[in-house]
Amino acid sequence: MSTETPGTAASGAVGQGVGPDAASPVARAEAQGPDRAEAGTDARGDVRADARGESRTDASGGARGAAVDRAGAGSARTGTAAPAVRARGLVKTYPGGVTALNGMDITVTPGTVLGLLGPNGAGKSTAVKILTTLARPDSGTATVAGHDVLRHPDRVRRAIGVVAQRSGADPVATGRENLILQGRLYGLRGAELNRRADALLERFTLTDAAKRMVQGYSGGMRRRLDVALGLVHRPEVLFLDEPTTGLDPEARTAMWDEIGRLAGDEGLTIVLTTHYLEEADRLAERIAIVDRGRVVVEGTPDELKGELRGDAVHVELRADGDRTTLTEALAGLTGLHDLMLDGRRVSVRADDGAAAVPALLAPRGGGGGGGGGGAVRRRSRLRPIRRGGGVARGAGHGRRRRIRSRSGR
């Protein structure tokens, strides 16, 4: 078994790549004994293993307990005024000149949920890798649960739980064996560990499947197990990297309910990355919209939606020549804002979208130069809108009405 860094790759991935003929993960953990190997990170960011005991002393000389001492602490430490997560000026460039992060700033208040929302390649996952000590920034600083991710990565790992995009569970072990091994890596033993595993299995409705190998789990069951693995040691901060990607609507809704309970009932600090607009709107108390390695706008869902006026109206022109005619006509209408032109597509915000559409679709100058069709989107959910290749503030489409001209075009 290759030793994994506690609390990292996919909620502390356990025993990945172990063949079916290998010993059970619990037996492998038993063989390690109490002085288990714990992974650290050297100056190059490479993972190494060094033997440590169950407690340590920090730079100020104060004793810091290992995971077994932190097990009952949970989110009690989140009562401090310091941010649970704070990053300033993070820059990360990959070979080939690919800039993943370009001065990203993040602040997460203890006991809240921050949603990092953005398209693929925006830098969300790279930011999570840095905050969970799986990657090193080229420049910038970051602290998690009061610990510097570069100077004290081992302390960060003991304070966090991570659910990565790919499942970290050992497929040839049972669900319960995965939880027991994860607990042993964090120093839990005996009856306490058994009670914790049973409680998590019950909480995530996995009790009936506890003795089945994970490779036989459905996608939703495996994802629930991933979250349970990230919670075994009662972390202070939980990172969820696109936790519902690939799940069916029913499983996604169930996962949303559970994440909501974690944040509401237990006061856990959660950093959530997602593509799903509804997911961010439903779960996050604050949302940071990320694009091209930077946070371009941040606020509560209501704040971001409240900055927009009226409805979004989109009109597709029948011909390129209609564009000038329509633009001139729009100048004479009231209640319209934020006009955007993209080829034959015209987008505008209107105080009353339903009233604006007939005027937009009306024939112009007797030559029939009106719009071919239009759509009105009422503001109800957060929606990022593309502007010149970037993500800007936007509002959603809780109710959409499709309107066409009488000609049927």
Image: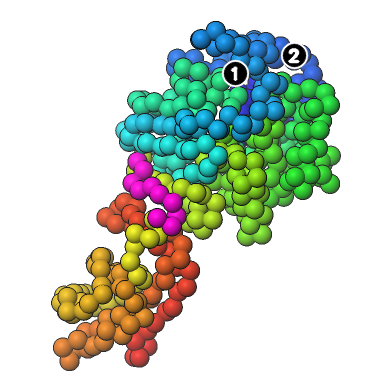
At 74% across and 23% down in the image, what residue appears?
Answer: 188
Q: Is residue 213 magenta?
A: no
Q: How many marks?
A: 2
Q: Please, what is the three-letter code of the amino acid marked with disc 1?
A: Ala
At 27% across and 77% down in the image, what residue appears?
Answer: 317
**Region rendered in magenta:** 294-303
Checking the image for residue 238, the label placed there is none
Q: Is residue 57 left or right of residue 92?
A: right
The N terminus lies in which quarter of the figure? top right
At 74% across and 33% down in the image, what residue appears?
Answer: 179
Q: Position of residue 265 (x, y in %)?
A: 65, 45
Mark 2, residues whose alpha carbon is within 10 Å: few (<14), some, or many (≥20)?
A: some
Residue 66 occupies quadrant = top right
Q: Position of residue 372 (x, y in %)?
A: 31, 81
Tell us which disc is closer to us: 2 or 1.
2
From mark 2 to mark 1, how far is it between C-alphas?
15 Å
Mark 1, residues whose alpha carbon is within 10 Å: few (<14), some, or many (≥20)?
A: many
Checking the image for residue 39, the label placed there is 1
Residue 98 visible (yes or no):
no
Main SS, magenta residues:
strand
Q: Position of residue 311 (x, y in %)?
A: 36, 71
Position of residue 379 relative to residue 264, above or below, is below
Residue 18 occupies quadrant = top right
Q: Is residue 295 magenta?
A: yes
Q: Is residue 339 left or right of residue 129?
A: left
Q: Is residue 216 left or right of residue 56?
A: right
Q: Label 1's element?
A: strand
At 40% across and 71% down in the image, what residue appears?
Answer: 377
Residue behind mark 2: 34
- 325 and 239: which is toward the camera: 239
Position of residue 377 relative to residue 92, above or below, is below
Q: Position of residue 210 (x, y in %)?
A: 81, 41
